[in-house]
Image: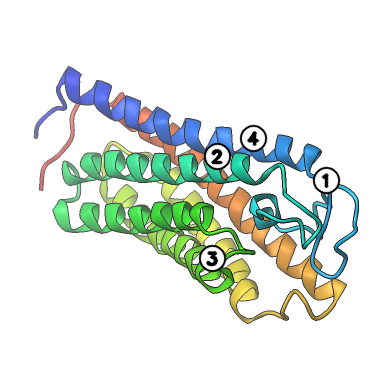
Amino acid sequence: MSSLSTAEKRLLLIGYLIGLTGVLQYTVVTWWLMSVYPGGRIGFSESIGYDFTLNFLSDLGRTSRFGLGENPTAFGYMATLASAGISTTIFFGTLSYYFTRTVGKFAANLCFILGTIAGIGYIGVALNPIDEGYWIHVKFVQWGFIGFWCMTLVCAFCIFKSPGFPNLYGYILLLFAVMLGLQICVMLFGPRSWTSDEALRLQVIAQKVVVYSEILVMAFLAIGAIKALNRSSLSVP
């Protein structure tokens, strides 16, 4: 048995709060960007405003509004998404340090690697607007979503093996993993968004379910990690 030092606990707490702040700022900023987005979507370039069920989040980051001029929300979306990606990487680096003290280095490092893959995916999406590099943008989206899904499974395993981490958060992760998996299947294998408004709506809703589910996962994990941090002792395998 060993205990985390006061300095270690402070650093872990900072890492958890950075992760939580990162996803919360993304939520707030994107909702504001939606309110000022001038318009334009797949199949209807002259649409007015942002339609939550017909506009992708990536539309906020387009440098050009479907050929109708410069998009004023592009830089804001790039900045908030890149910040979320960086904070995601920091969060899982911090969480993996905790797991090295409870379940060992292999599972902890795998959790960190997958969390980092997700974070890099988000940063890649931010730096490659969909109208400037469609395929690389799509690949980074898939990289981020699939990396995060794999991370939830590994992280759930680590939680169940960590004596100081409430198992409830592991079960929550597994529930999210099922939901995320279904939505990722829609993203990968569902009808293409440009074929009809119905297909577009399905893909847009699937994307938002994935994104906001990931935000909830991060928030739940941060709360659970802070609770675990308050436990006095940790086992070292």
Location of residue 11 in the rendering, given as x and y in whole percent from the top left corner: 25, 26
For mark 4, does the 10 Å Cα neighbourhood hold few (<14), some (14 to 19), or many (20 or more) residues? some
Q: Residue at x 71, y 42 (%)?
A: 72
Q: Picture coordinates of residue 183 (x, y %)?
A: 62, 67
Mark number displayed over residue 47: none
Quadrant of the rendered structure where residue 47 is? bottom right
User: Alpha-carbon neighbours of circle 3 within 10 Å: few (<14), some, or many (≥20)?
Assistant: many
Q: CA distance from mark 2 to mark 3?
A: 16 Å
Q: What mark, if any, has residue 137 been given in the picture?
A: 3
Report the amino acid beneath label 1: Pro
Disc ID at residue 29: 4
Which residue is under mark 2?
80
> What is the three-letter code of the residue carrying label 2?
Thr
| Contact, mark 4 vs mark 1 (Cβ under 8 Å) | no
The answer to which of marks 3 and 4 sits earlier in the sequence is 4
- Front tag of 4 and 1: 1
Instruction: Tell me the distance, in whole angstroms, between the alpha carbons under discs 4 and 2.
Output: 7 Å
Is label 3 in a helix, a strand or a loop?
helix
Circles 4 and 2: CB distance less than 8 Å? yes
Q: Residues within 10 Å of mark 2 (few under 14, many from 20)?
A: many
Q: Element under label 2?
A: helix
Residue 232 visible somewhere in the drawing: no
Q: Mark 4 and mark 1: span between their CA atoms?
A: 16 Å
Q: Nearer the viewer, mark 3 or mark 4?
A: 3
